[in-house]
Image: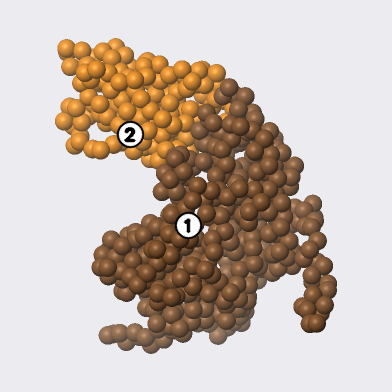
Chain colours: A brown, B orange
Amino acid sequence: MFTLEAFLPSMSTQRTEALDVERIREDFPILGRDVGGDIETPGAGPEDDTPLVYLDNGATSQTPERVIDAISTYYREYNSNVHRGVHHLSMEASFAYEAAHDRLADFIGASGAEEIVFIRNTTEAMNLIAYSWGLKELGPGDEVVLTEMEHHASLVTWQQIAKKTGADVRYIAIDEDGRLDMDHARELIGPDTEMVSVVHVSNVLGTINPIAELADLAHEHDSYVFADGAQAVPNRPVDVGELDVDFYAFSGHKMCGPTGIGVLYGREDLLEAIDPFLFGGDMIRKVDFEDATWNELPWKFEAGTPPIAEGIALAEATDYIDEIGMEAIQRHETDLVEYAMARLEEFDDIKIYGPPRGEDRSGVVSFNLEGVHAHDLASIMNDDAVAIRAGDHCTQPLHEKLGTAASARASFYLYNTKEEVDTLVEAIDSARQLFA
Amino acid sequence: MSMGSDMYRQQILDHYKNPRNYGELDDPSFTHVGENPLCGDAIRVDVKLADDGETIEAISFRGDGCAISQASASMFSGELRGKTLEDLDEMDRDDIIDLLGVDISPVRVKCAVLAEKVAQDGAAIYRGEKEDMEKTVTE
């Protein structure tokens, strides 16, 4: 019988091997840093005395040397504006920048560059669709369906567009373990639903939402689906065709890329039909004193000088991730989060949010230590150079539902180790002792 | 590493665990509330003035939040009794940091000054110098 594995034995072997974390860590210069000194002078300094334990990857991931090099090479060797130039540097830059769109299309299973719009981040992608599609198409009686675990990027955006258009926002409820209530989803998604905008992976709970199933529900009622993939694309294989989404977005800086670059995926026919969000240079075909026509996709949505170095560096980041292997990264994260949850569960005074250990979960664990506010906990852990995040993680309504103003969150990536999880647990114990 | 550990010296932890002037006054001259969105700290401050309408006779607070915000409210309320509204007006973040006696990391300053800002806004509203507002928010 035909099997893919039979034809690609080396690939399947490579992908089932554990990550060589020691070697991977060498790719990230920042991971060798000590911290603790003067914060007003950015960068390593003589007062820094404690090795960094970086567990804030859900907020931003670190950048491998070759991605830093891609940015540096661009500025050193072919920095130039794209598209309009016929000179050599501009052609080099244009070629690389356009190839980066192809690379990102390939990375998420889109059909081509025409479906890949480079924007600043996931939030901007959400705003682009909300303003250019939502403002025009939504009206009184229409409904936008979100989830209770939505990030402010989508929640606040659709809320404001709904206020402007008279549309209603509905929220799919979560159960006590932070999973979507799919019965509730089936109740909410109906003939008045125009858009289902859902987070693929929760940045707080680690829940993996059933996007393809939600897309089926939405499409049954002629609604569109927009999935926020900010916490999904960095750490699991994502194929927009398999998910059957109409729109999808993610940010470069959470997947070994630079800040200031993100991707909006949109189905080609939909992007063709939608008006541009930003007007200006580069996005036009023909302009006269009365009117203008739009450039072809995706440039129609990339007004002004785009993030050229960032886009090229993001393509380099996807190469890096693919060479290591997304399945291996995903399994490494799962191992770490399972281990972290098992360690945290040893203590009765720690409450963990989200689906229990053993379920499919991303590499984040949010928790609270009884009697210690999450911000106090994070400040004390900073003494041990353990970088975690504390607060509402841009999900205030979710935290209200969880019954807490703030939580502490540790989030792992391909370069983290079990030893770092142990340091995390020890640092939590320091806070426990201090507040006892 | 100076910043974090210094922030949680014994005095601050003591005020956090055993807050002074905690509760509500029976007949306050004014009451005001506020919050610090960073930590989700919330504070209500009650102030009772003496017959001269200037001297702070009694002050209490109630709140919920991080150790820095709650310890600061406890220490600040102790400091304020017997002072005048003018004294309160003149206080700024440096006074609060002096009162706490520790280095506060820049992002946590808004926790430390919450009680002070709430009391100052409450006084300003009471004297008609500020329009009434739902709550004070430290930014």
- Image location (x, y in percent) of residue B132: 20, 36
Q: Quadrant of residue A235?
A: bottom right
Front residue of this view, candidates B134 and A246: A246
> Measured along the vertical axis of the image, is residue B36 above or below residue A238?
above
- Image location (x, y in percent) of residue A82: 53, 77
Which residue is drawn at the image coordinates 50% and 63% (left, top)?
A228
State which quarter of the image contains the N terminus of chain A.
Answer: bottom right
Front residue of this view, candidates B9 and A266: A266
> Measured along the vertical axis of the image, is residue B124 above or below residue A104?
above
| Foreground tag (1 vs 2) | 1
Which residue is drawn at the image coordinates 31% and 62% (left, top)?
A168
Can residue A278 be seen here? The reply is no
A84 horizontally vs A44: left or right: left
Residue denoted by label 2: B34
State which quarter of the image contains the C terminus of chain A.
Answer: top right
The answer for which chain carries disc 1 is A
Residue denoted by label 1: A181
